[in-house]
Image (cartoon, coloured by chain):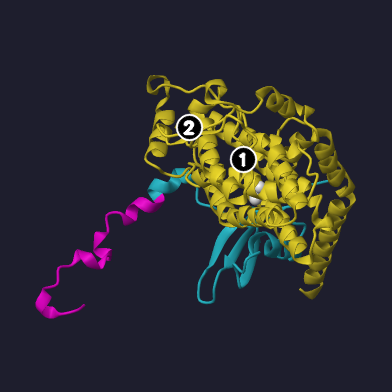
Amino acid sequence: MYAQMVKSEGSKSREEMTPEELAFQDRIDRGEKIEPKEWMPEGYRKTLIRQIGQHAHSEIVGQLPEGNWITRAPTLERKAILLAKVQDEAGHGLYLYCAAETLGVSRDELLEKLHSGNMKYSSIFNYPTLTWADMGAVGWLVDGAAIMNQVPLQRTSYGPYSRAMIRICKEESFHQRQGYDIMMKMCAGTPEQKAMAQDALNRFWYPSLMMFGPSDKDSVHSAQSMAWKIKMNTNDELRQKFVDQTVPQAEYLGLTIPDPDLKWNEEKGGYDFSEPDWSEFFAVIAGNGPCNAERLGARVKAWEDGAWFRDGLMAHAAKAEDRARAARLAAE
Amino acid sequence: MSSEWPLWEIFIRGQHGLNHRHVGSLHAPDAEMAIRNARDVYTRRNEGVSIWVVKANDITASSPSEKGPLFDPSNSKVYRHPTFFDIPDEVGHM
Ligand SMILES: [Fe+2]
Ligand SMILES: [Fe+2]
Ligand SMILES: [Fe+2]
């Protein structure tokens, strides 16, 4: 998902746990929230930093494919809406960085790890946004897939993460609806506009399915994270839910899901569908997707170009404080 | 130089008549910028009518390991709750 393939620890049986670990697991099983300064296993803390950090990076890097279209939106209203949507994503990144920082990692450390390639962000943002219809497909499918994953995470065991997810979920349905609204407009337009919508769906379908991460049979990190309630559902469960929800929405638009094997399965009460090309997924995660270099390059450039400004404001704040102190002393 | 901007804890009064409530934190070089950033980060949808910002370093928190000694003493004082007392129905609302 926004956090794909987060490395976790091997899970322990109750016999292998120390008394502290047992008490901790019992708290989680009772549904209690774990708060920042409380005792937690080192693996819990590390896994959360990786997962929340990756999630935050995804929100921030996720602004780039959509930011691409702000200056070229077809109307002033669409431009204002897209701007608000992208600004929300910046907010989501900030809520999540704050949550990660409560675990004892600094903001600069997290950014340094993103910029040096030591921390990942979601594979989905390494695909290009070629036409305006892509803004529709991204809101509808990418934010739609994100919502699938984020709604259950509101119940995650770590208090600050859970509270950040609650804020984020409140804001996400606007994102998905504005995307679907773009798709409806395009599909009700000229044949060329509808073809653009179909083309956007064709390009974003499988990358969206990849957002949930590898198939459960290849997903090695799940058991411990699920016991800790850091991960609430398996990758395949969420992917199935997403397909079942999205197919009727595509039908309403009069668009075709680019999967000849897509078929309703009465017995399981869901669709059968083709898996994405996992070799493509692993290539994108490893840094070899169509836009990896461009996305990371844009982040690093923004960070470096902004250094003089961040430093300038700090220098100004320090001087202002000195002046205020001097004035106080003079008045005494 | 490049030192990280300090962390500020953000408190928002959601509506007139309610207390300020902690909503999260953010980094800013000074208090004024912290308020401006808090406006953008935490009140994009009319969530507030007033903002307090406090440097995270200036907050003293009780420690989780003191939870027992700090809060247990009130556990045994059940008479502080009105339900402790049985008042006959004839007395009427009290
Ligand atoms: Fe988001
Ligand atoms: Fe998003
Ligand atoms: Fe979103």
Q: Is residue A63 visible?
A: no
In the image, which lettered chain appears yellow? A
Q: Is residue A173 left or right of residue B73?
A: right
Image height check: is A300 above or below A322?
above
Task: Measuring from the top left, give residue B85's x and y in whole percent.
Answer: 18, 67
**Is residue B73 one of those drawn in magenta?**
yes
Q: Tell me the magenta residue range.
A: B70-94
Asked where in the image residue A209 lies, by quadrant, the reply is top right
**The magenta stretch spans residue A52:** no
Give the amino acid type for the residue marked by disc 2 in the picture.
Met
Pointer 1 local density, CA inside 10 Å: few below 14, some 14–19, many at least 20 = many
| Relative height, residue B4 to residue A28 (above, below) | below
Q: Are marks 1 and 2 on the same chain?
A: yes
**Chain where mark 1 sits:** A
Residues at marks 1 and 2 touching, judged by CB atoms closer than 8 Å: no
Lower position in the chain sequence, tag 1 or tag 2: 1
The outermost residue toward the front is A191
Camera sees residue A68: yes
Q: Residue at x 55, y 29 (%)?
A: A43
Task: Kindly identify which chain the residue marked by label 2 belongs to.
Answer: A
Closest to the observer: A51 or A159? A51
Q: Is residue A287 left or right of residue A93?
A: right
Indicate the quadrant where residue A9 lies: top right
Task: Quarter of the image for the N terminus of chain B: give it.
Answer: top right
- Residue A5 placement: quadrant: top right
Q: Going 60% across and 40% down the picture, which residue do you hit? A: A103
Chain B's colour is cyan
Count of numbered circles in the view: 2
Near-viewer residue (B33 or A13): A13
Question: Which residue position holds label 1?
Answer: A52
Please give the label number shown on residue A226.
2
